[in-house]
Amino acid sequence: MKTGLLIAAAMTLTAFVAHAQQGGKPAAAAPETTRNGTKAADAKKADKSVKKKAKVVVEDYAPLASEYGQKAKCPVSGDEFKVGEGTQAIKYKGKVYYFCCGSCMPKFKKNPAKFAK
């Protein structure tokens, strides 16, 4: 009977030491695999990366002198005007958008998908 208790105590002590060596974290389980053979953790990471939308950058843009005099239509107000030296502009998804006044550009920056065409 003493031998059984000693064995049980030794096993408990061994488990305790192993747990302490892992920083108190439970032992890592074997990774689960999906039907196509990839690890389940990798599949979850892939799902998260697909769900994250790429952040679209809105860049300030200064019209070039060669663009002065070009006709433009403000994407916010719909007003038509000619691009000039003081015209404010933004580059969004590779396209340049010109604004008729200083109050339209912040509206566009707040929700570019709404105004971009």
Image (spheres, rainbow, N blue to C red):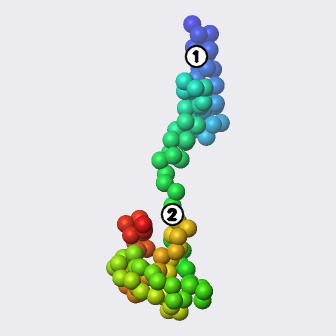
Marks 1 and 2, Cα distance to the nearest angstrom? 61 Å
Q: Which tag is nearer the camera, tag 1 or tag 2? A: 2
Q: Residues within 10 Å of mark 1 (few under 14, many from 20)?
A: few
SS class of the residue under badge 2? loop
- Residue 50's mark? none
Q: In this view, does 7 lie above or below 64?
A: above
Q: Given the image, on which type of amino acid does mark 2 rest?
A: Val
Q: How crowded is mark 2: few (under 14 residues within 10 Å), some or many (20 or more)?
A: few
Quarter of the picture holding the N terminus: top right
- Residue 2 at what x, y percent from top left? 59, 10
Q: Nearer the viewer, residue 14 or 58?
A: 58
Query: Measured along the vertical axis of the image, is residue 82 above or below residue 32?
Result: below
Question: Residue at left 64%, top 25%?
Answer: 14
Q: Residue 56 carries which label?
A: 2
User: Quick check: can you spot residue 76?
Assistant: yes
The amino acid type, in three-letter code, at marker 1 is Ala
User: Label 1: which residue?
Assistant: 8
View extreme (left): residue: 77
CB under 8 Å between discs 1 and 2: no
Q: Identify the residue at horizontal 62%, vertical 10% (top origin).
A: 3
Q: Check the image and name the residue furthest to the bottom.
A: 85
